[in-house]
Amino acid sequence: MTPSALRALLAGRFPSCSARDGAVAPDGLPTGLPAIDTAGGLPRGAVTELTCPASGGGASLLLGGLLAASRAGGGRAALVDPHNAFDPDSFPASTLQHLVWVRCPAPNQALAAADLLVRDANFNLVVLDLRRLPEPALRHIPATHWHRLRLAAEAAGNTLLVQTAVAAVPGTRLRLALAPSLPLAALEKERLLLLAALSPVRTRHPLAAAV
């Protein structure tokens, strides 16, 4: 989907809404993970980077917790998925009713779509999944793109979560890392128990000071 087509779709589905005067809510967006929520959740009006391999199940669990939290809070969420990797059947239908799923055939279109969505104050959560983007391509994304996304999130007061396989996004307020994969025995546990057991690690990357 091209950015212009996405813009037309959003205009038809949601009433226009102005940005929130640049104000950032003091409380963060809940995730369902005690290790994150006790520290305030994901910051609003900012970019959070989550590093987790595409094959790991932690990112999917975190996404489920975020969707449930944003749904409970009456907000809307958007997922930009350039690799068509999202499996809606693995999530409860009740947590997907407020989700806009954008599938883009190219990373540059995914970045453009994320930029458009973050600027729309109708969304309190935008997730950009780049975990399957090769590391060289990820690191060659111009810093100006990330700078624009950061400023857009600050202006709209929403949360932008960028999922990557390696830490590479500059200007993030929070950077988290999840374990490479869940043990086989974890598949027998309930989703909520798995979510509570995840222990994301806060990390810092040299590129954070680039913007």
Image: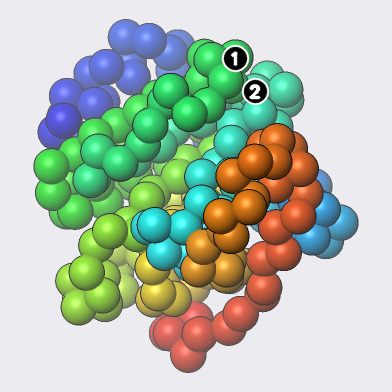
- From the viewer's perspective, is 205 left or right of 9? right
Q: Residue at x 64, y 50 (%)?
A: 186
Q: Is residue 190 above or below residue 178?
A: above
Q: Residue at x 50, y 68 (%)?
A: 180
Percent position of residue 30, x then y: 74, 43
Name the element at disc 2.
Answer: helix
- From the viewer's perspective, is 72 left or right of 167? right
Does the rendering let one see residue 93?
yes
Q: Is residue 113 above or below residue 35?
A: above
- From the viewer's perspective, is 176 left or right of 88? right
Does the rendering let one see residue 150?
no
- From the viewer's perspective, is 137 left or right of 17? left
Total residue callouts? 2
Amino acid type, callout 1? Ser
Percent position of residue 176, x then y: 60, 68
Residue extending farthest to the right is: 38
Q: Considering depth in this image, is 93 or 12 the residue closer to the camera?
A: 93
Q: In which quadrant of the rendered image does the N terminus lie?
A: top left
The residues bearing labels 1 and 2 have C-alpha atoms spaced at a distance of 8 Å
Q: Report the residue marked by disc 2.
A: 71
Q: Residue at x 65, y 41 (%)?
A: 188
Q: Residue at x 48, y 90 (%)?
A: 206
User: Residue 210's image quarter?
Assistant: bottom left
